[in-house]
């Protein structure tokens, strides 16, 4: 049980090797909230639709996202504001048009595994 922190070393384990595998799978505990935040972005259907659209069609404008998703422009803008604040998407200005692209490579990898039936 070489990976068990000292403060937990007194606990009995049934299978020492599985405890170490579990600890290894968790990785650095301070990274868990970062991943939880990523997953929370995916938990709301409109955000997930926008993220999928931006991932696969970006850079893409608000109006085009609204048309593609069926979400009104104002709601799309509000969601994109949240996604920008979280560092998930970035905006690129092209004259009067603002286009959005996904900037979180880890989230992009997750979205690549989302299959549409």
Image (cartoon, helix red, strand yellow):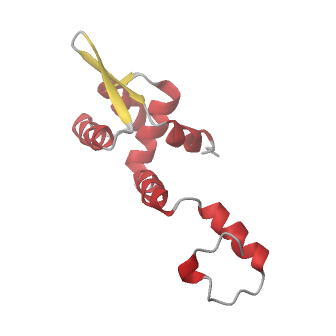
Looking at the picture, tell me which residue is in the foreground, 106 or 99: 106
Residue sitting farthest toward the front: 6
- Residue 81 percent location from the top left of the image: 25, 39
Side (left or right) of 97 relative to 32:
left
Looking at the picture, tell me which residue is in the foreground, 106 or 73: 106
Residue 115 image-quadrant placement = top right
Residue 10 image-quadrant placement = bottom right
The quadrant the N terminus occupies is bottom right
- Residue 75 percent location from the top left of the image: 25, 42
Residue 18 image-quadrant placement = bottom right
Residue 2's place in the image compared with 79, above or below, is below
Residue 105's place in the image compared with 45, above or below, is above
Looking at the picture, tell me which residue is in the foreground, 96 or 12: 12
- Residue 55 percent location from the top left of the image: 49, 32
Side (left or right) of 64 relative to 13:
left
- Residue 80 percent location from the top left of the image: 30, 38
* Number of numbered labels in the structure image: 0
Residue sitting at 32 percent across and 44 percent down?
86
Residue sitting at 44 percent across and 51 percent down?
38
Residue sitting at 58 percent across and 39 percent down?
109
Residue sitting at 44 percent across and 42 percent down?
49
């Amino acid at each position: 049980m070489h990976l068990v922190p000292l403060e937990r070393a007194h606990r009995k384990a049934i299978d020492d090797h599985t405890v170490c595998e579990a600890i290894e799978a968790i990785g650095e505990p301070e990274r868990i909230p970062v991943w939880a935040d990523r997953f929370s972005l995916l938990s709301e259907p409109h955000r997930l639709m926008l993220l999928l659209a931006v991932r696969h069609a970006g850079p893409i404008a608000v109006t085009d996202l609204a048309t593609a998703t069926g979400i009104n422009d104002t709601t799309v803008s509000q969601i994109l504001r949240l996604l920008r604040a979280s560092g998930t998407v970035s905006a690129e200005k092209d004259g009067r048009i603002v286009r959005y692209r996904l900037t979180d490579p880890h989230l992009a990898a997750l979205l690549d595994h989302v299959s549409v039936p």
